[in-house]
Image (spheres, rainbow, N blue to C red):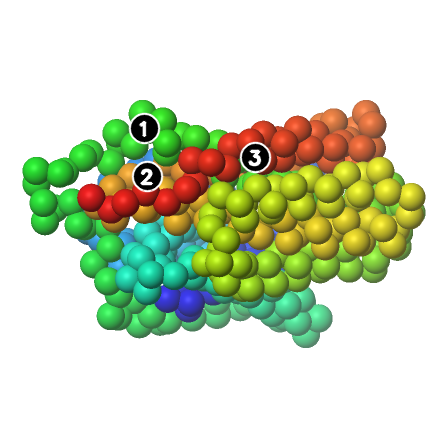
């Protein structure tokens, strides 16, 4: 199970690490690159709402296999497309976004089934595996670039690795996502999750935490440079501190969840992220900003994974509900960073991050629906 999460992070980060080289190879302007990158968002937004139906039909394990192959095909298409032109790269990114989006829902449905089977919190540790995969992909991309290995070779190797590893990783999975087929009297269409108040409220909570995570991931380095005059190296360090803090929180947060429960832990998490954000934005110097970054990373660590667990409390309805919550959460990942950028044009990136505080305050109040409910 860990390998599936690591593979998802590895695939995406391997592409992301080579974006500057792709832009250089194709001579893309920032505007053209931005439009090309939208293809990933479009692919994800197509896949996420329908992912619940797919998982419901064929199960989480088969969905992961199929979608990982589609994602790998997209990565390979981008790798080869760099040698041809922008059009095949856009097609490859669309495939990547579609495959990765549905893969994300399926692996969270499967992980929730494992969590329920073990009767203890472990979802956040799977998401720590995803974080590990992104770090590995970024480091591999940097190493490939330093060794002057072409983008094409780099991405083809990663695509081949996913094609081989992901089908093998799903052997022995639980039959997650298909439970409703076994009990027709309790069957609910996955799309009905879109009108369930609890599911939508969980989605709201995940949106607030995903917004905080996404804005920090994309802007924390720039904000320390823009607001505190940090060097480029220290800006990169700030990003590293955030990712390390978030990964640490996801790994060790599982024990805290089992001891104190979801709602209290998530409220403290949202408060930690809010306090950390305010220290980063309004603190007196770079040192306090780094301290704030640690609190911000620890605070956002559990938001998305625990939201997935809450959505999947009742296994027969998990596919549809996880799909809804993931879709809402990814909207924040997609909308948050551009919004900060637009506001940052007028007030600076550091001050623009303060808009995240309002959403974190909402998250602090919206944690209650994540409390566990019995599986009927």
**SS type, badge 2:** helix
Give above or below for 325 relative to 220: above
Q: Can you identify the residue that label 1 sits on?
A: 196
Q: Can you identify the residue that label 2 sits on?
A: 321
Q: Which circle, 3 or 2, is nearer the viewer?
A: 3
Please report contact status of discs 2 and 1: CB closer than 8 Å, yes or no: yes
Q: Which mark is residue 11?
A: none
**SS type, badge 3:** helix
The quarter of the picture where the C terminus appears is top left
Observer able to see residue 331: no
Marks 3 and 2 sit apart, C-alpha to C-alpha, by 19 Å
Give above or below for 174 relative to 261: below
Residue at the (66%, 44%) spot, across then down: 273
Where is residue 222 shown, x and y percent of the image? 78, 45
At label 1, counting other C-alpha atoms closer than 10 Å, the crowd grade (few under 14, some 14-19, many 20 or more) is few
**SS type, badge 1:** loop
Please report contact status of discs 1 and 3: CB closer than 8 Å, yes or no: no
**For residue 184, side relative to residue 75 (left or right):** left
Quadrant of residue 210 within the rendered picture? top right
**For residue 36, side relative to residue 294 (left or right):** left
Viewer-closest of 215 and 280: 280
Residue at the (42%, 67%) spot, across then down: 2
Q: Earlier in the sequence, mark 3 or mark 2?
A: 2
At label 2, counting other C-alpha atoms closer than 10 Å, the crowd grade (few under 14, some 14-19, many 20 or more) is many
């Amino acid at each position: 199970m860990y390998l599936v999460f690591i593979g998802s992070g590895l695939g995406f980060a391997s592409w992301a690490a080579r974006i500057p080289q792709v832009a250089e190879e194709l001579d893309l302007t920032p505007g053209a690159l931005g439009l090309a990158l939208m293809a990933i968002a479009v692919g994800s937004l197509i896949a996420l709402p329908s992912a619940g139906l797919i998982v419901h039909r064929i199960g989480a394990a088969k969905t992961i296999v199929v979608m990982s192959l589609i994602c790998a095909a997209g990565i390979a298409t981008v790798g080869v497309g760099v040698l041809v032109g922008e059009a095949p790269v856009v097609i490859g990114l669309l495939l990547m976004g579609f495959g990765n989006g549905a893969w994300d829902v399926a692996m969270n449905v499967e992980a929730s089934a494992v969590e329920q089977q073990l009767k203890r919190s472990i979802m956040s540790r799977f998401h720590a595996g995803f974080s590990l995969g992104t770090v590995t992909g970024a480091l591999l991309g940097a190493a490939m670039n330093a060794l002057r290995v072409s983008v094409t070779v780099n991405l083809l190797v990663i695509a081949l690795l996913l094609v081989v590893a992901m089908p093998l990783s799903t052997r022995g999975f639980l039959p997650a996502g298909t439970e409703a087929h076994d009990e027709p009297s309790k069957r609910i269409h996955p799309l009905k999750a879109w009108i369930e108040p609890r599911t939508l409220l969980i989605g709201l909570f995940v949106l607030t935490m995903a917004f905080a995570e996404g804005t920090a991931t994309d802007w924390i380095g720039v904000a320390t440079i823009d607001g505190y005059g940090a060097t480029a190296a220290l800006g990169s360090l700030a990003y590293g501190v955030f990712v390390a803090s978030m990964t640490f929180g996801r790994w060790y947060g599982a024990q805290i969840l089992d001891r104190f429960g979801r709602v209290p832990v998530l409220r403290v998490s949202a408060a930690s992220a809010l306090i950390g954000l305010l220290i980063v934005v309004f603190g007196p110097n770079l040192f306090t900003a780094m301290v704030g970054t640690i609190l911000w990373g620890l605070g956002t660590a559990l938001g998305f994974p625990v939201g997935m667990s809450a959505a999947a409390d009742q296994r027969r309805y998990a596919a549809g509900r996880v799909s809804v919550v993931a879709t809402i959460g990814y909207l924040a990942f997609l909308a948050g960073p551009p919004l900060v950028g637009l506001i940052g044009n007028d007030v600076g990136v550091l001050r623009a991050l303060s808009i995240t505080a309002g959403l974190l305050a909402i998250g602090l109040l919206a944690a209650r629906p994540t409390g566990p409910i019995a599986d009927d």
